[in-house]
Image (cartoon, rainbow, N blue to C red):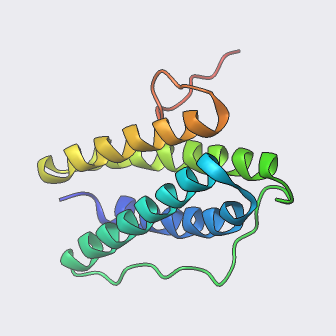
């Protein structure tokens, strides 16, 4: 069993990511829109899975906020792609936490989510992180 606090934090982040995809998706077309729709659906399934794990642990899953503050205005397809890449980079950090905290049963699932998030980020910004979600070293 994964630490309940980590599950709740991941669930809260999924709520925010889904909101962000809802803002970004309509500003995209063609292959980008298809990829964004697939990402939106994947995050909805992950949100449901996380809520299920929280409930199985005897806790009440954290509810979504009514709205979330975006880091910048999303007015174009370029803005939408940048937002999705940022969302995926952020949620990868949380998936990394899940991998570290997961019990044996959830670890493989968390690794899959981390990998899928890294691929989606690369799809939208071309950046590939060597170790997505891993804490970044501080360079003095």
Image position of 34 (left or right of 7)? right
Image position of 125 (left or right of 52)? right
Which residue does the image show at 57% across and 22% down from the upper left?
Answer: 137
Question: Which image quarter is the C terminus in?
Answer: top right
Can residue 96 be seen here? no
Q: Position of residue 71 (x, y in %)?
A: 78, 56
Q: Position of residue 124 (x, y in %)?
A: 63, 39
Question: Which image quarter is the N terminus in?
Answer: bottom left
Q: Position of residue 6 (x, y in %)?
A: 38, 58
- Closer to the camera in the image, 71 or 82: 82
- Closer to the camera in the image, 5 or 31: 31
Which residue does the image show at 40% across and 47% down from the upper left?
Answer: 95
- Closer to the camera in the image, 1 or 13: 13
Residue 52, quarter of picture:
bottom left
Image position of 138 (left or right of 37)? right
Above/below status of 70 relative to 80: below
Which residue does the image show at 86% across and 59% down from the upper left?
Answer: 75
């Amino acid at each position: 069993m994964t630490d309940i606090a980590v599950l709740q934090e991941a669930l809260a982040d999924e709520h925010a990511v889904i909101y962000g995809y809802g803002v970004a998706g309509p500003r995209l077309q063609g292959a980008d829109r298809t990829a964004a729709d697939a990402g939106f659906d994947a995050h909805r399934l992950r949100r449901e899975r996380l809520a299920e794990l929280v409930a199985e642990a005897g806790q009440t899953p954290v509810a979504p906020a009514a709205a979330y503050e975006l880091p910048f205005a999303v007015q174009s397809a370029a803005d939408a792609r940048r937002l999705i890449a940022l969302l995926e980079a952020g949620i990868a950090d949380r998936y990394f936490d899940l991998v570290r905290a997961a019990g044996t049963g959830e670890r493989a699932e968390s690794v899959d989510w981390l990998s899928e998030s890294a691929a989606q980020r690369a799809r939208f910004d071309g950046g590939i992180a060597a170790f997505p979600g891993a804490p970044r070293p501080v360079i003095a």
